Image (spheres, helix red, strand yellow):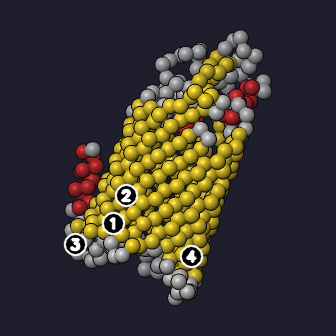
Amino acid sequence: MHRLLRLVIVVLALVSSASLSAAVLPEERADALYHAYDGGGVEISGPSVLVRKSIGQSMSVYANYYVDNVTSASIDVELYASPYTEKRNEFRAGFDYLVDKATLSVGYGNSEETDYTADTAFFGISQDFFGDLSTLSMSFSVGSDEVRKTGDPTFAEPIDRHAYRVNLSQILTKSLIMGLSWELITDKGFLNNPYRQVRYLDDNADIGYSFQDEVYPGTRSSDAYALRAKYFLPYRASLHAEYRVFDDNWGIHADNYELGYTHPLYESWLLDLKFRHYNQTGATFYSDLFPRRNAQDYLARDKELSTFSSTTVGVGVSYEFAKNGWGFIDRGSVNVLYDLMQFDYKDFRNALVSKEGLAEPGEEPRYSFDANVLQFFISIWY
């Protein structure tokens, strides 16, 4: 925490003499989104609708409905299970209340799947100060989840989640905005996937290894720091950059950086470009292949807990319409975003190769895959 405080002091010391209006409510708007993900044998798609409306001069309410349709034949599923399909429905609602230069935010969300339920409550406060050049935001969320297992009606395990977030944004010049954020997350309960298994060497097995259920610690805590900057260029273009670092008590350390550029095309078009790179070390209890059954107290073979890196290249195009109003519409935009993601795992191997008898256990090629992410959405301000 002392690192965050030092950085906050540095940023606050850079306050300039530029001007900015006091806190305002979010604009009234409606968004309709379609998203699609395809990579690593997993396909996810579905719609999302968000509506925000002001009530008087001091309150803004919103509601969001989001759907994920999942078809999974991932490498884990192919190794010891059957492909499956499922549907996740998520609903969120809340309000923002404006008091002078402060904004209070309260929200609630629910997510439902066949074998998982998540309920989350959120509270936040944002305050402008130092001549409205600085904005300090703090929030707290608490979640209560239930993990179930298809085929076992007696299986129901709880998870309690808490998250604390602090964000400071600062106008340094008329063209430059910087932000600093800190996040602490604590989880307690059944934190592993009830279907996922680890593999261990077994001379009695035809393929050279057998499987047993994963076993995770019952608690996890993590903190993350991020530094962001956005610079506005004279011709309506902008540059943005972000650096983020993450640590948890499972031994994972991660960092990523992102660079982006927004460029105007003609009068009504915008082009967005981005590049992101992510690196992560593995959890202390992770192994692709354990030497024996019950080799240690905690066991994991989730590739997301392994050592890996990913690179994302993204492009987006936006078209603004009805700039002068159209009926009840003040303005609108049509947006298409595409990301190409590449994942390279350092100590997670393609065990399907040894399952088919084409390599010895532990000598399979390291796993990698590409993913395509598409988002199409329409936004209307009214």
Q: Position of residue 334 (x, y in %)?
A: 60, 73
Give the distance between the C-alpha atoms of the residues marked 2 and 4, in whole angstroms.
28 Å
Secondary structure, mark 4, is strand
**Mark sitting earlier along the chain (1/4):** 1
Residue drawn at 44 percent across, 28 percent down: 218
Give the distance between the C-alpha atoms of the residues marked 3 and 1, in whole angstroms.
21 Å
Secondary structure, mark 3, is loop
For label 1, the crowd category at 10 Å Cα-Cα, with few meaning under 14, some 14 to 19 and many 20 or more, is many
Residue drawn at 22 percent across, 72 percent down: 131
Residues at discs 1 and 4 in contact (Cβ within 8 Å): no
Is residue 64 left or right of 138 when viewed as pictured? right
Q: Which residue is mark 2?
A: 106
3 vs 1, front mark: 1
**Mark sitting earlier along the chain (2/4):** 2
Q: Nearer the viewer, residue 330 or 4?
A: 330
Residue 196 visible in rendering: no
Give the distance between the C-alpha atoms of the residues marked 4 and 3, in whole angstroms.
33 Å
**Could you say which disc has been placed on residue 97 in the image?**
1
Secondary structure, mark 1, is strand
Q: Which residue is mark 4?
A: 333
**Label 2 is placed on what type of residue?**
Val
Q: Which residue is mark 3?
A: 131
Among the 4 quarters of the image, the one containing residue 58: bottom left
Residues at discs 2 and 1 in contact (Cβ within 8 Å): yes
Residue drawn at 55 percent across, 72 percent down: 379
Among the 4 quarters of the image, the one containing residue 100: bottom left
Is residue 215 left or right of 125 when viewed as pictured? right
